């Protein structure tokens, strides 16, 4: 379980530094971690703020990135007996890692679920703050090349979740499509379009397969 | 950044909403959309990588080399942070040399 926390520490710091480099304040950076609490979408939002993307584009990209959490909710709701208010509370703090901890431990209680979720929440926010403050001490983040953390993070996120041929095809197609249209379209529009078109391609390519179920190893390797 | 709070509110609604939806859902989704959702992280992550590798600082070549190292290590180790740190270290090393 410990590597989960080790994994989110550099990512939280990297997000905070990128967010500061994108022009968000320490408080705005922290607010994203406190209220949204979803690493990949916080990263993309920071980047989109920097490029002047529209609000709807940022929110829709966030939706595309985070709608996968519904899969983990569906899976958890079948295993853990939850009252309605417990569903609401555990939904707010639900992450890929918390789901991974639940499946790995075999625990079936709300208390264990909330404990896993909150320990990740506290870690994520503590290291967001550290990164945001340390980032503000850096003389010029862009001159240091810190913006490079952004594509690298998503590359490091992407590679381990490619395990099947269809996933490799979708990744290559999506990368090429985004690269081709990013110079012609503003802000987050290429991400949105690529997210939808690439996922449609994937669903079409796998039309003959059985519906997927969330796997533990996927959950552990993705970020909050 | 007057739009900031409005955008954050939207992000919270769609993120919290997705998490709520799953925990309250009992009926299964249509198979096509289950498969669609499986590919969303892959398509979106790829879209966030390729347009941003080169950057605007004329360091495209060394960034590409560093990204390749990051990708290979992430693939071999299956660890996000090993690829990330190796990629940044390689980038900074190349920068200081060239």
Image (tube, coloured by chain):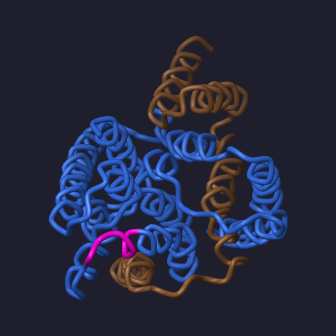
* Residue A164 relative to residue A214: left or right: right
Residue A171 place in picture, x, y as percent: 74, 51
Residue A92 place in picture, x, y as percent: 29, 74
Q: Main secondary structure of the magenta part?
A: helix
> Chain B's colour?
brown
Report the front residue among A55 and B69.
B69
Asked if residue A79 is positioned above or below residue A174 in the image, the reply reads: below
- Seen at 50% across and 61% down, the residue is A50
Dividing the image into 4 quarters, which one contains the C terminus of chain B? top right
- Seen at 80% across and 47% down, the residue is A165
Asked if residue A76 is positioned above or below residue B74 in the image, the reply reads: below
Whether A80 is among the magenta residues is yes
Report the front residue among A53 and B11.
B11
- Seen at 44% across and 34% down, the residue is B81
Residue A36 place in picture, x, y as percent: 34, 70
Tell me the quarter of the picture where residue A194 sits: bottom right
Q: Residue furthest top?
A: B97
Tell me the quarter of the picture where residue B7 sits: bottom left
Residue A209 place in picture, x, y as percent: 77, 64
- Seen at 38% across and 69% down, the residue is A76
Asked if residue A131 is positioned above or below residue A199 in the image, the reply reads: above
Whether A154 is among the magenta residues is no
* Residue A166 relative to residue A126: left or right: right
Asked if residue A45 is positioned above or below residue A166 in the image, the reply reads: below
> Chain A's colour?
blue
| Bounds of the magenta segment | A76-81
Dividing the image into 4 quarters, which one contains the N terminus of chain B? bottom left
């Amino acid at each position: 379980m410990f590597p989960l926390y080790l994994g989110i520490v550099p990512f939280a710091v990297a997000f905070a530094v990128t967010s500061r480099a994108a022009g968000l304040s320490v408080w705005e950076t922290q607010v994203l971690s406190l209220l949204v609490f979803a690493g990949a979408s916080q990263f993309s939002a920071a980047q989109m703020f920097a490029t002047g993307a529209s609000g709807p584009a940022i929110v829709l990209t966030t939706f595309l990135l985070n709608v996968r959490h519904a899969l983990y909710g569906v899976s958890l709701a079948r295993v853990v007996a939850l009252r309605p208010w417990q569903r609401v509370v555990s939904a707010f703090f639900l992450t890929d890692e918390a789901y991974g901890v639940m499946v790995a431990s075999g625990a079936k209680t709300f208390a264990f679920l909330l404990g896993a979720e909150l320990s990740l929440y506290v870690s994520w926010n503590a290291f967001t703050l550290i990164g945001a403050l340390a980032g503000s001490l850096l003389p010029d983040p862009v001159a240091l090349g810190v913006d490079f953390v952004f594509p690298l993070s998503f590359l490091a996120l992407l590679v381990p979740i490619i395990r099947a041929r269809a996933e490799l095809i979708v990744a290559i197609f999506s990368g090429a499509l985004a690269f081709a249209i990013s110079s012609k379209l503003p802000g987050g529009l290429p991400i949105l379009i690529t997210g939808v078109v690439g996922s449609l391609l994937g669903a079409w390519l796998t039309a003959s397969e059985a519906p997927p179920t969330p796997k533990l190893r996927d959950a552990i390797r993705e970020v909050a | 950044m007057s739009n900031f709070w409005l955008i954050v509110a939207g992000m919270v609604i769609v993120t919290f909403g997705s998490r709520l939806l799953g925990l309250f859902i009992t009926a299964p989704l249509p198979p096509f959309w289950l498969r669609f959702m499986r590919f969303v992280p892959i398509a979106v992550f790829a879209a966030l990588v390729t347009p941003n590798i080169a950057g605007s600082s004329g360091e495209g070549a060394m960034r590409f080399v560093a990204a390749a190292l990051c990708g290979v290590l992430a693939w071999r180790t299956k660890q996000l942070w090993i690829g990330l740190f190796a990629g940044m270290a390689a980038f900074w090393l190349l920068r200081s040399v060239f």
